[in-house]
Image: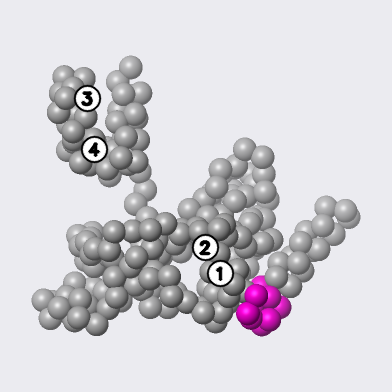
Amino acid sequence: PWWSVKKICSITFIYAGPVAYSFIQQNMPQALPSLRSVQRSVHNEYLIIHEGQFRFDELLVHLNRYNSPKVITIGEDATRLIARVDYDSETNWLVGFVLPGMACHAHLAKTFTSIEESFAKSVMSKYAFVYMAQPLLHGAPAFVLACIGTDNKFCAEDVQKRWSYILSECKKRDITVLSFGADKSTAKISKTMNQSSILLVTVYCLCLHNYLMLLEHFVT
């Protein structure tokens, strides 16, 4: 049926990119919709996640949708990017620079001068950090909390502020964060954690406290 072909084309476009999909479509023009049609479909049916914005309210909706307990684990991973800057016409942002601080976007394309200053003073992102929230309910899918461009240069204080911010915002919504995790591609975080006793105390003790409170809740 048409809807399944449409879905396959959308997935191919998302994972392979517009160039690859255009090549496939040109070889099967009568079987597959045009690139513009797929782009329009993806834009209308898939939620756009803006860089640097943490989606805590959407996370709460996600947990309620699956009747999941408000308990999550946070995982983060980094992937290498081709350093370049794109213009987002919906937000008037220049996307591709390293963002300063948390949950902010400093590169607005207000004037030609502001664009010129961004390229002169800012650093292009070399990695994309993706933050995922996993509900503790069987069958509940993981949730994309945020995606941030970075040059992979950070210290213990940056990690501490990042995780403390996530803990604080989740707490405002009565969401318990049990743990933070990263795989080998972000092993630099682990090295930073080993060098910072403050980070271990402020983050992992909070996670342990949350776990004990959750355990007490289920026992009683």
**Which is more N-terminal, label 2 or label 3?**
3
Q: Name the residue under label 3.
A: 32
Label 3 Cα neighbours within 10 Å, binned few <14 / some 14-19 / many ≥20: many
Q: Do the residues labelled 4 and 3 touch (CB within 8 Å)?
A: no
**Image quadrant occupied by the N terminus:** top left
Q: Distance between the residues labelled 4 and 1?
A: 34 Å
Mark pair 4, 3: CA separation: 13 Å
Q: Indicate which label's residue lies in the foreground, 3 or 2.
A: 2
Is disc 4 in contact with disc 2, using a CB cutoff of under 8 Å?
Answer: no
The residue at the far right in this view is: 220
Give the CA distance from mark 1 to mark 2: 6 Å
148 or 215: nearer the eye? 148
Amino acid type, mark 1? Ile
Q: Mark 4 points at which residue?
A: 20
User: Residue 150, which numbered label?
Assistant: none
Q: Which of marks 4 and 1 is nearer the N terminus?
A: 4
Magenta range: 194-203
- What residue is shown with label 2? 186
Q: In which quarter of the image is residue 175?
A: bottom right
Residue type at the position of mark 3:
Leu
Where is residue 144 shown, x and y percent of the image? 48, 53
